[in-house]
Amino acid sequence: MSAGMTSAATAMAVALVGTRALITFFRNRGKGQPILGKEDRGPDHHLGKQGTPTMGGLAIITAAFVGWAVAHIRPGIAFSDQAMIIWVGILVMAFMGFLDDYIKVRRSHNRGIFWKRKSYITLGLAMLIAGWLVAGTGISETISFTRADFPGWDLHWVLWVIWAGLIIWSTTNAVNVTDGLDGLAGGSALLGFIAFAIIAYWAFRNPDIYPAVVNPLDLAVVAAGFAGACAGFLWYNAAPARIFMGDVGALGVGSALALLALGTNTHLLLILICGLNVMEAGSVAIQMGVFKASGRTRRLFRMSPVHHHFELVGWPEPTVIIRFWIISGICVATALAIFIGDFTRLEQLR
């Protein structure tokens, strides 16, 4: 696993330097994150954060890529087709987020690409990325939990592309929704990438049990690079944040988590690994459902996503963040326990 350690360490170092450089760059230009006020039903209690540098996701994506590339300098690990397609998908989604961030900063208003249009575009891009994975690699076309043959429901490639595209799209949006408090999305993503690094490396060490995972070592290096990058970014993003991830980071990180789940054949396990993100996105869906069902008169939460609800009932922001990190850690630990438990059961049956 020395390649993974190299990737993580390099990515963390690059993220520390790159994030600091981004903070200086945006501060010198007087550009930062606009915050929605009460007139836009936004978290006006965060107006004090207005002007904080954003687009820190640029440092995360760059650092993870550099860490992944540097790890390939050592012999014994090759650049795989699957990892490179995954990287193209991540960069495409991150660029979409960058455009949104750029419009927000330029207009000094927290409305980038109109949210419905942005949702349609990201969904279309997700389908294209999923289609390329099917066409360009030997990825398993089944619905999977801990491995390709469990439950192993075979899908026609068209249906699999739709399924995989929805996974990519929903995960990117869920991470974007989670990115509302200092370090919340970055910390939970760090735990998710550590989980995928373990899962991919486990598949690499046990190819007879996970034969359908294509180039698992390279996937482990990608995950380790993102884990290191998130750790380096959190040095400056932890409360009180000196820089925000921005949509470029949320969409890039979200697509990376989804694509690693697809690559390691842990589609359904992703629900647990990204359990916090599921909870956050679910709170928005529930809030909208209650609001519409009541004739636009009632809301279940004081504000959604649910992290804002807990702020408004009196929890200090650091308390919300740390407790939500704990929830994320429990979800990730449960997912790894299920994955390893399934492996142990198979080993005992051999």
Image (spheres, helix red, strand yellow):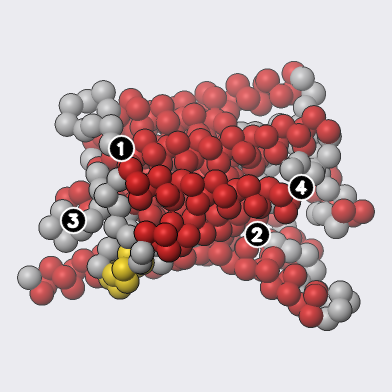
Q: Judge by depth and name the residue closer to the eye, 318 or 264.
A: 264
Mark 3 and mark 4 in contact? Answer it, CB < 8 Å.
no
Which label's residue is closer to the chain start, 4 or 1? 1
Q: In x, y percent, where is residue 268?
A: 41, 66
Q: In x, y percent, where is residue 304?
A: 73, 64
Reading the image, the residue beneath label 4 is 114
Which label's residue is closer to the chain start, 3 or 2? 3
Q: In the displayed structure, would residue 75 be above or below residue 140? A: above
Mark 1 and mark 2 in contact? Answer it, CB < 8 Å.
no
Which label's residue is closer to the chain start, 1 or 2? 1
* Alpha-carbon span between mark 3 and mark 4: 43 Å
Residue 50 showing in the rendered view = no
Amino acid beneath label 3: Pro
- Count residues near mark 1 (Cα–Cα under 10 Å), then give few for <14, some for 14-19, many for 20+: some
**Label 2 residue SS:** helix
Reading the image, the residue beneath label 2 is 320
Dividing the picture into quarters, in which one does residue 157 lie?
Answer: bottom left
**Label 4 residue SS:** loop
* Alpha-carbon span between mark 4 and mark 1: 34 Å
Reading the image, the residue beneath label 1 is 81
